[in-house]
Amino acid sequence: MLKIKFLFFLYLIILNNFIIAQTFSFCLGTNSYVLNTEGKQFGKSFTHSKFYPLTNPYLGIDLQMNETISSGFKFGYLYTKIHEEDFTGLELEVLLKYYPLGKMFLQGDINFHFNMPYKRELSSRTIRMIGVGAGYNLSKIITLEVLYYLPLKKEYLPKSYFWGGPNEIRNVIKFGILFYPPLRKSN
């Protein structure tokens, strides 16, 4: 029941943003990221960080409310090498940007990662993360951003008799590049 209420609330936010947006634009982007994990595999504890370059393509929608505030959504797919992390799956981000200095912006978002492990016997997890970051518009069509995420639920793989676990995310750092095709539309 809580999930249904949350999805309805999210739907209202999306609908409200489309109604009051002065302009909206679409973007294509990709993220490189650093995944910091800890857990157990085959009886041994581990803690490590790994850099994954350009492994998170997505489509985004930006809704400009006024000169200093915009909100948006990103829909994408995050993948890692099979049998390595098992942190792979669909992603949805709901974000809010604040532009205090024109081209530079501060960003806060909620990220939903729908984890899909490579083995079917490992159950999937929905991982919610809170992110903060900053970005810079290099031009009208190219934007760079960096975000730091903390998971609200850290476990992405459950405890398993065969290999150990559970595996948990400590944090995620994303480095993104966005491309805005010149298709902007004003209301």
Image (cartoon, rainbow, N blue to C red):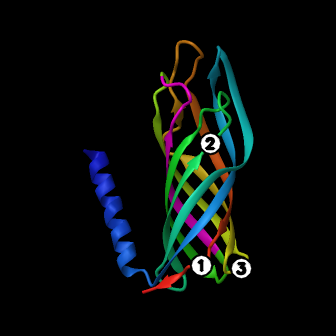
Tags 2 and 1 in contact by the CB under 8 Å rule? no
Q: Does residue 100 lie above or below 117 as drawn? A: below
Q: Which residue is mark 2?
A: 79
Mark 3: which secondary structure?
Answer: loop
- Find disc 3 in the rendering and name its residue: 139
* Mark 2, secondary structure of its residue: loop
Which circle, 2 or 1, is nearer the viewer? 2
Marks 2 and 3 close (CB-CB < 8 Å): no
Disc 1 residue type (three-letter): Tyr
Label 2 and label 3: CA atoms lie apart by 29 Å
Instruction: Work out which quarter of the rendered image holds the N terminus and state it.
Output: top left
Q: Say which element carries label 1.
A: strand
Structural crowding at the residue carrying mark 1, measured as other residues with C-alpha within 10 Å and reported as few (<14), some (14–19) or many (≥20): some
Residue toward you, 59 or 17:
59
| Magenta span of residues | 105-120
Tell me which residue sits at (66%, 54%) in the image: 174
Q: Is residue 181 magenta?
A: no
Query: Residue type at mark 2?
Result: Tyr
Q: Name the N-terminal-most of marks 1 and 3.
A: 1
- Report the mark closest to the observer, 1 or 3: 3
| Labels 2 and 1: the sequence-earlier one | 2
* Left or right position of 112 against 77: left
The 10 Å Cα crowd at callout 3, few under 14, some 14 to 19, many 20 or more, is few
- Considering depth in this image, is 15 or 95 the residue closer to the camera? 15
How far across and how far down the image is residue 127, in percent?
A: 49, 42
Q: What residue sits right under mark 1 in the picture?
A: 99
